[in-house]
Image: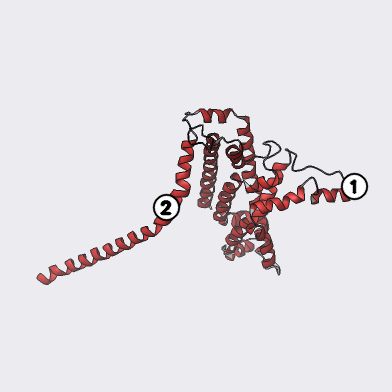
Amino acid sequence: MAALTKAPDKTSMKTKSAKLKRSRRESSLWWMYLPSVLIVVLFIVYPFIDGIRISFTNWNGFSQTYDYIGLDQYKRMFADPDTWLVVKNTLLYGIGSTILQNIVGLGYALLLNHNLKVRSFTRTVIYLPVIISPLIMGYIWYFFFAFQGGALNDIFLLFGKEPINALGNPAVNPYIIVFVNTFQFVGIAMIIYLAGLQSISKDYYEAANIDGATGWQKFKNITIPLLMPSITINMVLNIIGGLKLFDVIVALTNGGPGNASQSMSTFMYNLYFSRQDAGYAATQGVLMAVIILIISMAALIYFKRKEVEA
């Protein structure tokens, strides 16, 4: 009987020992996360919280003293017509770039998913602009669209046409910014879509061919549903990137003429450094963060649900 009672005790001790070792191992893994957590807190969480605090002040960005003025900056922001202009531009840059990057990126991916002789070269050329600084990319296109000495106007003059001031036209320059941003970052969307397409089993298409499905039916009922994870990633990344667009705008138009092509990022920059109005700039930053959070989370939830349906 004594032998029978000892066996469960040994088993229980081994189980407890294994659990203790696993707990210690998990605890040590958590310590490895600590540097990353500290970096995020130091450079993202703390500046954001401090920015919210500054939005309740009249700080000019340089003075050692300032006053807390409550919600005055927020009242000023919602009454400022420039706020709604830059919000409209920001939404145009974010949503417009997202739509174009996904349509063109998916088109490139569908083309390069076939066994083309120049597939690797074409993929490299399309992706190449991504590795260039957005500021440099903006200046490259500036010398194409510039009124004086721009390549586009040189072409017009060559054919006897009048030059156009595309970057100085408020009705045109926001769309030029969307085009340049799309041109630069469409390669990221292409790569993500290409990876998604290559993960789809060919068995689905072979079964569809046997059933007599057309190309459009295969694209609609097989490709798109199975590509939803890639669509989700691209949509969220492109929306966030487009809504916080800064470098390209500075290089092409510097937000002009006036505030006609300002985004919320460039507007904040000018408020802080040119107008020395840090409190108001922080208020605009809070609004920008809220807009990005709402739109990106809405897009993420919507497309995640589509993944479940697929």
The quarter holding residue 192 reads bottom right
> Which percent across, then down, holds residue 116?
70, 67
Q: Which residue is mark 2?
A: 38
Please determine whether, in this image, residue 249 is positioned above or below residue 230: above
Q: Secondary structure at mark 2?
A: helix
Is residue 291 depicted above or below 24 in this figure?
A: above
Q: Position of residue 211 (x, y in %)?
A: 62, 61
Mark 2 crowd level (few <14, some 14–19, many ≥20, 10 Å Cα): few
- In the displayed structure image, the side of residue 227 where residue 5 appears, left or right: left
Q: Earlier in the sequence, mark 1 or mark 2?
A: 2
Q: Which residue in the protein does label 1 denote?
A: 160
> Quarter-wise, where is residue 249 in the image?
top right
- Position of residue 122 relative to residue 295, above or below, is below
Please count the marks in the image: 2
Which amino acid, by three-letter code, is at mark 1? Gly
Q: Amino acid at mark 2?
A: Leu
The residue shown at (63%, 59%) is 131
Q: Residue furthest right?
A: 160
> As drawn, is 116 to the left or to the right of 192?
right
- Name the spot of residue 310 as percent of width and height, x first: 53, 53
